[in-house]
Amino acid sequence: MEPAELLEKVRSGLVKLYEIEKFTNNDVNKASEIRRRFLEKELNIKLEYLGKYSIDLNQTLNRNIENAIGCVQIPVGIAGPLKINGEYANGLFYVPLATTEGALVASINRGCSVITASGGANTKILYDKMTRAPLFKVKNISEAVRFVQWVKEKFEEIKIKFEEGSRHLKLINIHPWIIGRNVWLRFEAQTGDAMGMNMVTIATERACKYIMENFKEAKLIALSGNLCTDKKPGAINWLLGRGKTVLAEVTIPRDIVKDKLKTTPEEAQEVAFKKNILASAFAHAYGLNAHIANIIAAIFLATGQDAAQITESAMGISYAEVDEEENLYVSVYLPSLEIGTVGGGTGLPTQRENLRILGCEGGKESGLNAKKFAEIIAATALAGEISLLAALAAGHLAQAHIRLGKGK
């Protein structure tokens, strides 16, 4: 069918917007052009830029997008070099950041310079586990307790069913909760270099089928029972972790604080405590930090991560104190960093290139790339926190945004 004829069939309602690929031999680029032309005619507008992109939208078919009409382009900046002394990330790194916020990349870049001049950031991964928590219903609380005990006894059998789908998938724990006759089973699994949400969801469904076949009194109410917890800030991830739980730290010599950050360790410590800790506690925030979400969002958008998971990935604590030698010690704690280097948007060409810049493109055995990536993100978050804390302590924040964020 010719594009003009297909467009008229769409406009007349004979072909739905989501059906266009059926008539373009699954060519998403052609289908997206027809949708743009449809919108232009229906809405009497001009869409000049959505159709200007470098990637092949055919790569997104049945993978990344439906009803495609084009691409949104976000400027990408680079920060670094950033020296990291981690178990998986070790050396100098340049970090791509996708953002439309003026002054952000410059601020993170300053923090990278400070960390590198101070000998580098030390990083550690504490936990590595993606979760899914199905909800079951049983007859009463006695049955609920018996069900939980049965799951514990049958863990190895459940583990076999759970892991059938992938050699990279490893079930490490099933954490139960009971409210009345409702039972949640929080499956915790390692997923290699994939962020693993879909992988764990599919594996959990296999495990649930096995459970219901062998414990017939249990009825599955929801495959995702919201104790996972996905795409929402929550105490369960804050305390138990989800994805990668990561630490980063650096000790900044006093002279570097004065020369590069234009403040003192004491002033930076006071801002960190009273702003990040005291005020955040008063607000009951799940982020005791200055702006970790800025860094997480910029890296997520640049590297094809699930943008909705910025919500819990940006939860974190940044902490600063003056040490015994009167230098400035700063650390960042990220309990729920949900990232991957394969799957989802990481396979798109521009996102792959940004992962290539980090040396984290694609997959490796035992999830080494995702762990390396997690340490880089934590160290970059540390850089962003250091720079903003110093800007606040020195009274430079507003002027920096006037100079770099207002087109002056």
Image: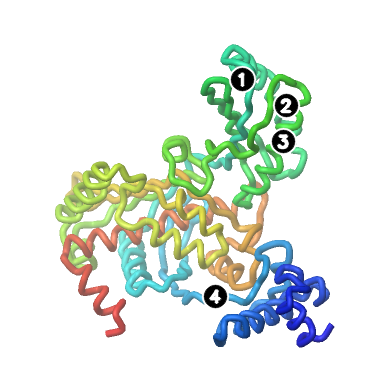
Considering depth in this image, is 90 or 167 the residue closer to the camera? 167
Q: CA distance from mark 3 to mark 2?
A: 11 Å
Identify the residue shown where x is 58% and y is 29%. 184
| Quadrant of the frame with the N terminus | bottom right
Q: CA distance from mark 4 to mark 2?
A: 44 Å
Amino acid type, residue under disc 2 in the picture: Ile
Q: Residue furthest front?
A: 12
- Which one is earlier in the sequence, the residue at label 3 or at label 4? 4
Amino acid type, residue under disc 3 in the picture: Phe
Q: CA distance from mark 1 to mark 3?
A: 17 Å
Please tell me how crowded label 4 is: few (under 14), some (14-19), or many (20+) other residues with Cα within 10 Å. few
Is there a contact, CB below 8 Å, between mark 3 and mark 2? no
Secondary structure, mark 4, is loop
Residue 279, position in %: x, y?
Answer: 22, 47
Q: Which residue is mark 4?
A: 72
Q: CA distance from mark 3 to mark 4?
A: 38 Å
Q: Residue furthest top?
A: 142
User: Closer to us: mark 1 or mark 3?
Assistant: 1
Residue 315, position in %: x, y?
Answer: 40, 48
- Which one is earlier in the sequence, the residue at label 4 or at label 1? 4
- Which one is earlier in the sequence, the residue at label 3 or at label 2? 3
Identify the residue shown where x is 54% and y is 23%. 178
Picture disc at residue 148:
1
- Which one is earlier in the sequence, the residue at label 4 or at label 2? 4
- Which one is earlier in the sequence, the residue at label 1 or at label 2? 1
Picture disc at residue 162:
3
Considering depth in this image, is 250 or 157 the residue closer to the camera? 157
Q: Which residue is mark 2?
A: 211
Q: Give the vertical position of 29 relative to 380 (above or below).
A: below
Secondary structure, mark 1, is helix
Amino acid type, residue under disc 4 in the picture: Val
